[in-house]
């Protein structure tokens, strides 16, 4: 699937009085998830330019049965996605909800929030997924039946500065977790990936693409289990979301900084993201990648203008400054690799693509070589290995090139 026509965010009144968010499709948010959705003056769903995919199906009896009385483990449990996932999973009545995070503060917050729902059945675990011994002890003691892997380094600028740390966390953390899952007979494993993994131009996307390969390879080792990947677009309201940046810049009187006039992104809300994860955990199949039908990509420049108006300001009050694409950033994102073909997922609003696993011995050699490069902090070798394995190719376009030039670049890249 290629990026389609651009969506121009619809104009609104230049002044919009503050009002509480009106989100009939969205379940209540976790108290520990600090998101833009808590802002009383902004309704983020109105910025999507499409209908929100409802979450009613996640409350269907067949979904609930998949998690009721099960031992469910969530990594990155204290993050914006992980915390909302934990809150919703708690409603299904798991026998144990294992909260895994390597941030003590995040873990403390989500544990306090969840204990109000399920009490002693919440099990906070301060564990780093990169540590084999710690994971082995955790899986031996907690015996999870379902694993949701949401922990990752996700910020493109940070991972560009620290490639070795990104690979260590996103690739080898996933590998260690998959190994533990296979060794302890986990029935269902779901990993959060990103559209940046498709034809990646940055370390974060390339690391998540390789992590996808790791998950698919472990599915071969556990034919009786389901190992599934879920590709997210940009999640509106999550930590690090562009909306947080825009909100702060508007509150400060501007300017809003946009990297390029032609940049577009696919967007989804936190409830949509969590609903997709729950559906994947209940119905996903090995060697499949699930994607939400997110409509057409949204132009970030239009999103900035929309936010200015939605917050009761005018374009004369708040200026928009073009600052240029940062290292690793793309003008547009894609959802599918060239060889991936979508099929029916059996889930409303969700697409499924069959993945092509990498040869197991070749992947093993790649990971061995990558481990040496990470150990030595050899960033040149890391980038070379990623380029050969994931089609990683850094690129960029001047900040002030026209939207027409951006569209021409899009068409060229899609050939």
Image (tube, rainbow, N blue to C red):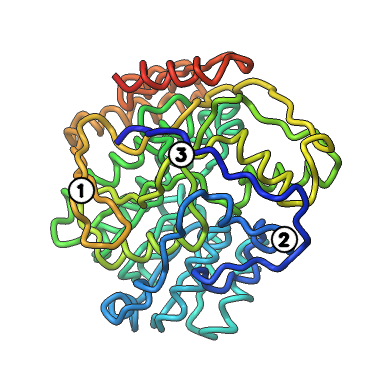
Q: Which residue is mark 3?
A: 297
Q: How many marks?
A: 3
Frontmost of labels 1 and 2 is 2
Helix, strand or loop for disc 3: loop
Identify the residue at horizontal 73%, vertical 26% (top origin): 321
Apparent side of residue 277 relative to residue 21 in the rendered image (left or right): left
Residue 30 spot, x, y in % from top left: 59, 70
Frontmost of labels 3 and 2 is 3
Image quadrant for the N terminus? top left
The span from disc 1 to disc 2 (Cα, nearest Å) is 39 Å
Residue 227 spot, x, y in % from top left: 25, 55
Q: Which mark is residue 39?
A: 2
Residue 135 spot, x, y in % from top left: 41, 58
**Looking at the image, residue 387 lies above or below residue 356:** above
Q: Which residue is mark 1?
A: 287
Which is more N-terminal, label 2 or label 1? Answer: 2
The span from disc 3 to disc 2 (Cα, nearest Å) is 24 Å
**Looking at the image, residue 255 lies above or below residue 402:** below
* Residue nearest the viewer, comparing 326 with 368: 326
Apparent side of residue 187 relative to residue 324 in the rendered image (left or right): left
Instruction: Using a 10 Å C-alpha cutoff, classify the residue at mark 3 as few (fewer than 14 neighbours), some (14 to 19) or many (20 or more).
Output: many
Image quadrant for the C terminus? top left
Q: Which mark is residue 185?
A: none
Which is more N-terminal, label 2 or label 3? Answer: 2
Identify the residue at horizontal 60%, vertical 54% (top origin): 237
> Looking at this rendering, what residue extends furthest in the left direction?
223
Q: Quadrant of residue 115?
A: bottom right
Q: Is residue 116 visible in the rendered structure shown here?
A: yes
């Amino acid at each position: 699937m290629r990026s389609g026509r651009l969506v121009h965010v619809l104009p609104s009144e230049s002044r919009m009085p503050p009002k509480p968010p009106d989100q009939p499709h969205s379940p209540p948010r976790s108290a520990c998830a600090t998101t833009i959705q808590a802002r009383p003056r902004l309704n983020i769903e109105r910025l999507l330019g499409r209908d929100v995919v409802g979450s009613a199906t996640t409350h269907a009896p067949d979904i609930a049965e998949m998690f009721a009385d099960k031992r469910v483990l969530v990594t990155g449990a204290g993050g914006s996605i992980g915390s909302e996932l934990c809150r919703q999973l708690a409603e299904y009545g798991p026998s144990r909800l294992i909260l895994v995070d390597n941030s003590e503060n995040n873990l403390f917050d989500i544990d306090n929030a969840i204990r109000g729902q399920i009490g002693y059945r919440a099990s906070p675990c301060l564990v780093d997924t990169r540590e084999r011994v710690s994971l082995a002890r955790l899986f031996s003691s907690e015996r999870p039946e379902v694993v949701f892997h949401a922990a990752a380094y996700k910020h493109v600028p940070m991972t560009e500065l620290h490639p070795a740390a990104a690979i260590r966390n996103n690739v080898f953390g996933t590998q260690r977790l998959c190994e533990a899952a296979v060794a302890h007979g986990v029935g269902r494993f779901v990993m959060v990936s990103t559209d940046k993994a498709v034809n990646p131009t940055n370390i974060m996307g390339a690391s998540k693409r390789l992590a996808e390969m790791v998950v698919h390879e472990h599915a071969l080792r556990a034919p009786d289990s389901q190992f599934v990947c879920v590709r997210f677009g940009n999640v509106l309201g999550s930590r690090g979301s562009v909306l947080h940046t825009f909100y702060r810049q508007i509150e400060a009187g501007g300017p809003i900084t946009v990297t390029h006039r032609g940049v577009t992104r696919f967007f989804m809300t936190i409830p949509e993201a969590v609903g997709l994860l729950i559906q994947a955990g209940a119905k996903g199949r090995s060697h499949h990648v699930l994607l939400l039908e997110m409509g057409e990509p949204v132009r970030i420049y239009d999103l900035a203008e929309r936010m200015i108006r939605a917050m009761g300001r005018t374009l004369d009050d708040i200026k928009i400054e073009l600052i240029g694409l940062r290292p690793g950033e793309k003008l547009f994102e894609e959802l599918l690799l060239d060889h991936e073909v979508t099929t029916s997922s059996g889930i409303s609003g969700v697409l499924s693509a069959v993945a092509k696993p990498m040869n197991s011995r070749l992947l093993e050699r790649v990971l061995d070589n990558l481990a040496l490069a990470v150990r030595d902090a050899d960033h040149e070798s890391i980038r070379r290995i990623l380029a050969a394995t994931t089609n990683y190719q850094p690129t960029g376009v001047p900040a002030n090139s026209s939207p027409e030039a951006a569209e021409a670049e899009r068409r060229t890249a899609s050939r």
